[in-house]
Image: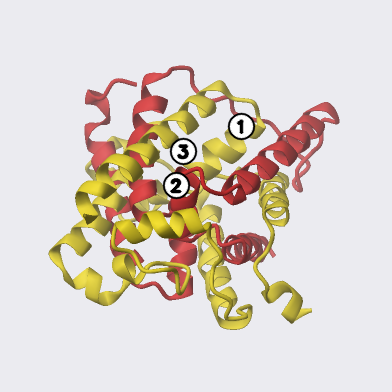
Chain colours: A yellow, B red
Amino acid sequence: MIEFISQPWPWYVSGAVIALVMVLLLFFGSSFGFSSNFRIICAACGAGKRVPFFKFDWKAQSWNLLFLVGTVLGGWLSQEFLQNGEVIQISTDTVQDLQKLGFAAPQGLQPQELFSLEALGSVQGFLLLLVGGLLIGFGTRYAGGCTSGHAISGLSNLQWPSLVAVIGFFIGGLVTTFLVFPLLFS
Amino acid sequence: MKVLKYILTGILFGVVMSKSEAISWYRIQEMFRFQSFHMYGIIGTAVILGALAVFLIKKLKLRDLQGKLITFQPKEKGITRYLMGGTIFGLGWALVGACPGPLFVNLGQGYWSILIVIAGGLLGTYFYGVVRNRLPH
């Protein structure tokens, strides 16, 4: 059993479980939207005293923080107990494209070139992660949701604004991939 | 139980995102380069099954565990905020290779440098709160 679930899971299993997570949260009387946690954490840290946007009853949404704790635990459990040491099999085209940018073929889930402590120690490496985070935090709140809130919950409920947001996600992603990466890494 | 059910659902989400490699920067790169079906398959399956579930929940007027009718908050109308905000998020998503949920899954996986991204996410959210009245929505 453990051996079986330790293999990489196919996309259709993953998609089905993500839909299940959304449905479970609906039956709990909540709704699936992860980036709200950034706002909740800001509010819990007292940001509401200075900025009205963070003045709301965040405790009513603290279930989302419990969900967040669960995701961290889920990552840890997978890493600790559900690993079979297999190297991630991404498309050879992607491996080649990334090699041109100076990225070695994958070893783990994340590239050492970006996430190792050495990379973090360089000014460029540190700024890249910080700026990436700033864009994620700012953009998700401006758009009113991220992949879970718009792409999964919103599209499942056939919301046009969510489709617009997802189109935006892709515009931004393509700009970074095809315009920014060649400037940063070559 | 109240606490446990959310934590367990979170664990399920963290495990599935890990085991399907959806938290990997490489998978996100592959998606934005249109070189694999994997991420499209994941999101597509989730949306199709999700839409079916939402349809049934509305049709059958299903209730949540507290016995309240499950309702859906329609998203506010508009284009600017979704397109602008979405694009800004997308710039960061491709750069770091993770959206907000997977950031925390990666933290559990032991990628400590993700803490810088999470700190950036909190700062970015705070900054939005400060300037939001001056932005077109």
Position of B127 with respect to B76 (left or right) is left
Query: Is B83 located above or below residue B36 in the figure?
Result: above
Inspect this view and state whether residue A54 appears: no
Q: Which residue is mark 1?
A: A155
Q: Which residue is mark 2?
A: A35
Q: Which chain's residue wears label 2?
A: A
First-in-chain label (3 vs 2): 2
The image shows residue A162, relative to residue A88, as above or below, that is above
Q: Quadrant of the C terminus of chain A?
A: bottom left
Query: How much space separates mark 3 and mark 2, taking CA atoms?
Result: 6 Å
- The image quarter in which residue B9 lies: bottom right
Q: Secondary structure at mark 3?
A: loop
Judge from the rendering whether residue B128 lies leftward or rightward of residue B28; answer left or right: left
Q: Farthest residue toward the right?
A: B60
Q: Amino acid at mark 2?
A: Ser
Residue A64 lies left or right of residue B107; in this view the side is: right
Spatial distance from mark 3 to mark 1, Cα to Cα?
12 Å
**What's the residue at 13%, 64% (across, down)?**
A123
First in sequence: mark 3 vs mark 1 = 3
Q: CA distance from mark 1 to mark 2?
A: 16 Å
Residue at the (29%, 36%) spot, across then down: A52
- Give the label on residue A145, or none: 3
Q: Residue furthest left?
A: A123
**Point 63% across, 62% down: residue:** B16
